[in-house]
Structure formats: C-alpha cells, structure tokens
Image (spheres, grey):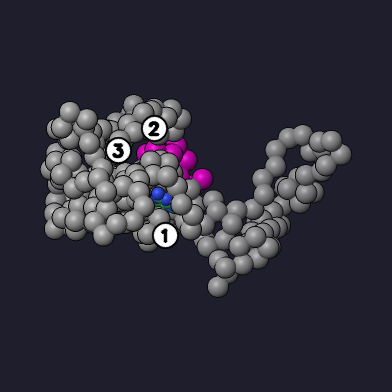
Amino acid sequence: MRIDIVTIFPEFFSVLDVSLLGKARERGLIDLSVHDLRDYAHDRHRTVDDTPYGGGAGMVMKPEPWGEALDATLVAASVVVFPSPAGERFSQATAKELARADHLLFGCGRYEGIDQRVVDYARTKATVREISLGDYVLNGGEVAVMAMIEAIGRLVPGVIGNPQSLSDESHEDGLLEYPSYTKPAEWRGLEVPPVLLSGNHGAIAAWRHEQKVERTRRVRPDLLG
Ligand code: 6GU
C-alpha cells in the first residue's frame, strides 16, 4: 500500500518510523511519504491560509497550494481522506475498507478548515472521504490521521504476524474484548479468574464470551443495539 500525507507539520509523522508500522515500512509493505504543503506555496512567506469569505473567526486554507499538492500526489485510483470533525465517523469498518486501497492520500487541514473547492475538485479526480475520529475538536487533522493510519496499517496483509490476533480483538464481532491476564496467578492479593487456569477450553471460551457481553453492556450499551 502507498500512503501520502500532505500537512504543514511534517514532523508530526516522524513517529511512524517506530513500532509495528515502522517495521512494515522497512519490509516494504507500506510505502509512506510526507509532503510539506508549504512546498507548494510560492510567495515569500509560503502562505497557506487566508481570511474566510463571508467573515467569521479564524483562517481558511487557500486552494492553490492544495491544488498543486494534489496534482503531485493524486492518481485516479487514490482514496483521498480529508480528516475533519464534520466528516463521517471513523470505525473499524472504515479502517477495513481503507486497508483495501492501493493508494491513500491524507490531506491534513489546520485552522478552520480547507477551502471547500479543494475537496470538490479532488472528487472530480478520485474517491474522496471526509472522516472524523469522533465528536470532539482537534486543532488539526494530523493526530487524527496518525490514529487512522495505525488502525488501517495493521490490517494490511503481512503487517501483523499472527492474523488470529486481529479477529480476537474489540469491535471485530461488535463486542468489546474480554479482559486478559498473565502470570503470576496471584498478585498483590488479586487472583486470576480460576476458569483461566482450568485447562477447560470450552469453559474458557464461554467465560470470555460472557465477559465480552457484560463489559459491552456496562461500558458501551450503544453497541448492543
Ligand atoms: Cl479528523 N479532525 C479534527 N480537526 N478534529 C477532529 C477530528 C478530525 N476527529 C475528531 N475531531
């Protein structure tokens, strides 16, 4: 999978060199490039924003640098993702869909957003998704894109060694994950649930399922519908 990121804060993405995704990049499974939007602004101050038409607080990102950045990175097969608190809600299902794309292009907006014509223009050239992480406001799309890339990247075939660990986790079957324990069997007076030490695989599976349902009911009743 190829991933391009356009941002005015390229340094945010240096953490993608480490951990699982860093390894996936080293192994050639994910080919990731970060582009500085200011490289596509040609005035002395490399201006990327301006005041909003119609008035109002804050600044809006200008279309011209974005147009050049898209021209340099976008192909017809691209899925262009604009992170925005006004977008559709990101979920495990979204991550799965995006993990199937050959090319993802993330356009990180700052300030009060990007001139809407940039999004409309991108739609004439490729598939475009405006995506939000949740119902709260971040200063810009960078941290949101980092979260999306982590969720998507680990679903790219080969990135995670044991694919079984993908099917056992929270949200995979609409339920939250069961609690996990490791040695020692007793720690500071707290015991591991005895069923996990029983060796009875049927009983363990039944207990884990019960825990998932109970936890989901308690913490996220909305998931039970
Ligand atoms: Cl994707 N962007 C911004 N700026 N704020 C957000 C968000 C995205 N998702 C939740 N809040």
Q: Residue at x 37, y 32 (%)?
A: 13
Q: Measured along the vertical axis of the image, is residue 109 above or below residue 56?
A: above
Left or right placement of residue 125 versus residue 86 in this view = left
Residue 7 has which mark?
Answer: 3
**Residue 29 coordinates in the image, percent (x, y):** 31, 35
Q: Secondary structure at mark 2?
A: helix
Verify whether residue 164 appears in magenta.
yes
Left or right of 123 in this view: 16? right
Q: What is the magenta range? A: 158-165
Q: Are marks 2 and 3 in contact (CB under 8 Å)?
A: yes
Which quadrant holds the N terminus?
top left
Alpha carbon of mark 1 to alpha carbon of mark 3: how far? 21 Å
Mark 1, Cα crowd under 10 Å, few <14 / some 14-19 / many 20+, is some
Q: Residue at x 14, y 58 (%)?
A: 124
**Mark 1 residue's CB less than 8 Å from ligand 1:** no
Q: Amino acid at mark 3?
A: Thr
The residue to which callout 2 is attached is 12
Tell me which secondary structure the magenta stretch mostly adopts: loop
Instruction: Please check the rendered image and state whether residue 138 is part of the magenta-colored stretch, yes or no.
Output: no
Q: CA distance from mark 2 to mark 1?
A: 23 Å
Q: Is residue 74 visible?
A: no
The image's mark for residue 108 is none
Residue named by callout 1? 89
Q: Amino acid at mark 2?
A: Phe
| Residue at the (52%, 57%) spot, across then down | 171
Residue 17 location (% of width, % of height): 39, 27
Residue shown at the point (44%, 33%) measured from the top left: 20
Residue 43 position within the rendered picture, expressed as x and y whole percent measured from the top left: 15, 32
Q: Earlier in the sequence, mark 2 or mark 1?
A: 2
